[in-house]
Image (cartoon, helix red, strand yellow):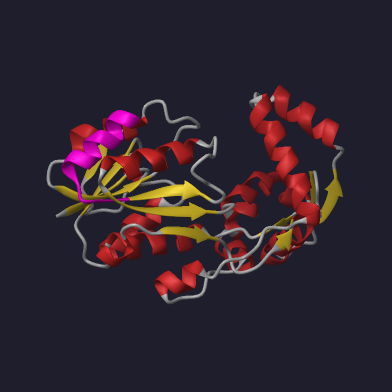
Amino acid sequence: MTILVTGATGNVGRHVVAGLVASGEPVRAVTRTPSRVPGGVPVVPGGITDVPELLDGVDRVFLLWPFTNADDAPPVVSALAERVSHVVFLSARGVSDDSPLFHARIERLLRDSGVGWTFLRAGGFATNTLEWADQVRAGVVRWVYGGAGRSLIHERDIADVAVTALTSPSHVGAAYELTGPETLTQVEQVRTLGAAVGRDVRWEELPVARARASMLARGWDQDFLDGGLAYWASLVDEPETVTGTVEEVTGKPARTFAQWATDHAADFR
C-alpha cells in the first residue's frame, strides 16, 4: 500500500519522500510545486485540504499542517480515519492536551478519530536560521536575546524519525519529543554559521522594542510575535533542553547544528 506524503517539497517532506524511496516504499507526493519532486515519484498537485480525494490505495500518511489554525482539520482527519491505518503527524514540542496551539487540536482530533497515530513533537527547526542569511553574508546578525539557548533540530533528523515510524507498526501510539543533540545560544549559532562559510560573523543585540516594531511593520501577527519574544526571553535563563529521542528511534545520533550549517553553507554565501 502507498504512503502519502503531504508537504512533499518542504524542508522536512522532501527528505521523508527521499527516505521512503530509499527504503523501497511506494510513495505518493502531495505538493503545489510538483516540479521539485524527485523523478519517478507519483505526484498529486494540491494541498492538505485536497487530501480526502487523494487516498485511493493509501495506507499510511505523513501529515504536515501548513496553517496556523486547525479550522479545516476535522474533515481531513475524518477522511484519514475512514481510509488509512496510520498517520504520522509533524506536531510541535511543548504540546499538551490543554495547549492552545493548533498542533494540540489536531493531535486531539487524531486521537479521537480511532486512526493509528504517531506524533513527532519537534523543537525549533535549524532551518529557521535561514532568516539570517542576508545578515550572515553582510557579517553582522542583528536580533534579540543573543543569550537565548536553543536545541535546534536538523530537518533530516525529523524526516528520519518519520520514515522509521511510517515503516514500522511498533511506533503507533507514540509521541516523540525531538530536538538536536546540543543547546547553543543564538550568538553561538551565528558563530557556527560564520565558521561554515569561512567568514567572521558577529552578533549585535537589537533592542526588543525596535525589533517588535520592525516585525509588526512587516505584517507579523501581534499576539504570535509577542508570544515569540516572551519565549526567546525565557530561554536566556532557562535554555531549551535536549532529548535523545532521534537516536533512540533511528539508531543514529542527531545531527549537530554545525553539521546543519555545513549542509546549508551555500544558502549563506
Q: Nearer the viewer, residue 263 or 63?
A: 63
Instruction: Indicate yes or no whether the magenta region holds residue 142.
Output: no
Asked whether, in this view, residue 268 is left or right of residue 233, the answer is left
Residue 121 position in % (x across, y down): 49, 53
User: What secondary structure prevails in the magenta region?
Assistant: helix
Q: Quadrant of residue 206?
A: top right
Asked whether, in this view, residue 131 is left or right of residue 2, the answer is right
Q: How many marks?
A: 0
Instruction: Indicate yes or no whether the magenta region holds residue 77.
Output: yes
Q: Which residues are magenta?
A: 74-87
Residue 230 position in % (x across, y down): 74, 40
Residue 171 position in % (x across, y down): 33, 63
- Say above or below: 237 vs 250: above
Kindly tell me whether residue 47 is visible in this rendering: no
Q: Give the residue drawn at x 58%, y 68%.
A: 259
**Quadrant the C terminus occupies:** bottom right
Q: Nearer the viewer, residue 138 or 123?
A: 123
**Quadrant the N terminus occupies:** bottom left
Q: Nearer the viewer, residue 74 or 21?
A: 74
Residue 46 position in % (x across, y down): 29, 33
Q: Give the residue drawn at x 68%, y 35%.
A: 227
Q: Nearer the viewer, residue 189 or 3?
A: 3
- Say above or below: 99 vs 201: above
Q: Give the residue drawn at x 80%, y 53%.
A: 236
